[in-house]
Image (cartoon, rainbow, N blue to C red):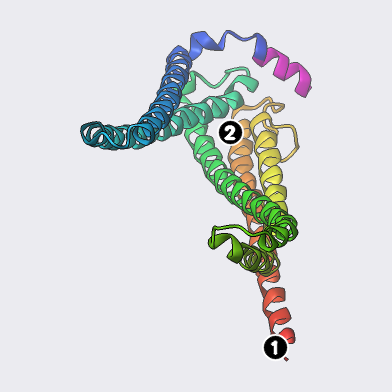
Amino acid sequence: MITSDISTFEQQPHREISPNLDLSLLAERKTLFILKLLEYLLAAAFVCCGILLTVYANNKNLVITGVITLTILIFLFLFNRYLFQDSQNAANRQYLTKKAEIYSYLLGNNNGFLENNPMIPAREKALQYCQDLIDDYKKARNLSRNLYYILQISTVILSGVTPILVLVDKLEVGQVWLKWLPVICPAIASIVASIVTSFPFQKKWVAANTTLELLEAEQEKFILGVTPAYRCYDLSDTSEQQQKASQAIEQFILQVNNIHIQQVQQASEIQQEKKESEKTDTK
């Protein structure tokens, strides 16, 4: 039943029903591509300008011009990033609107045109709520993962370089600052290792990734209606379809909240375990 309805949706000429949405998505994708290309060009110009300033540091006129150019490039880069983020948000909203319309296609479009269907704005709002949580967990996952890898790699490099620096210290080298490196590097490695053990970046990364996958799976179930709780297109009566669709939105919000609350509770438990371990260590 589900497969046949989905295949029917793919065969329907949905571009004739919502051509403006498809054109807007295409325009937003082109805009994102152009802005991303400009970002790369600005970054390359920034690097080239920095190299020129380094090579011709004795030329005061060139240095002044280069500093002004760098300032303008930084401003353009930040402004371009703002435009890119704004365009990306607009594209995501339009993409969620398109996802919300899948429900009406699966109904066979028996309830009128898409713009007259009151369920689409409600489904779009529910999908936007879930997508906001997904974006937040993506940021938390990426930040925790990057910090974990950077700190681990830094600890390994600093620990491996220390014996080499000890040998360099025994050589008669004119540079005074080289004699401090065998002391500074182990100290930094110890600090970095303490940060890794004190802050559970790996646990946060794994927990955020697990919650992210659960939210994405729940979102896809809701969009396609592949579970009985979200399936409303197998009912024949129009009023029953609308009632079931409304209940599906409520069930989806509750399920998303449950997934999010479980993650919050797990984070609280991790924090509590950390405090208890610190108390035990102090004793």
**Residue 68 picture location, percent across and down:** 24, 35
Who is closer to the viewer here, 31 or 101?
Answer: 31
- Write down the region rendered in magenta: 1-9
Residue 4 on the magenta span: yes
Quadrant of the rendered image containing residue 152: bottom right
At label 1, which amino acid type do we have? Thr
Residue 7 on the magenta span: yes
Label 2 residue SS = helix
Quadrant of the rendered image containing residue 82: top left
Crowd around label 1: few <14 · some 14–19 · many ≥20 (10 Å): few
**Residue 112 picture location, percent across and down:** 50, 19
Label 1 residue SS = helix
Tell me how far mark 2 sits from mark 1, CA to CA: 61 Å
Q: Residue at x 60, y 27 (%)?
A: 103
Q: Residue furthest bottom?
A: 283
Q: Residue at x 55, y 12 (%)?
A: 14
Relative to residue 70, is residue 20 drawn left or right? Answer: right
Looking at the figure, which quarter contains the N terminus?
top right
**Residue 79 picture location, percent across and down:** 32, 34
Say which residue label 2 marks. 242
SS majority, magenta: helix
Crowd around label 2: few <14 · some 14–19 · many ≥20 (10 Å): some
**Residue 4 picture location, percent across and down:** 76, 16
From this view, report whether residue 129 is shown above or below residue 100.
Answer: below
Relative to residue 247, is residue 40 drawn left or right? Answer: left
Mark drawn on residue 111: none
Q: Residue at x 67, y 63 (%)?
A: 189
Looking at the figure, which quarter contains the C terminus?
bottom right
Q: Residue at x 68, y 25 (%)?
A: 236
Mark drawn on residue 282: 1
At label 2, which amino acid type do we have? Gln
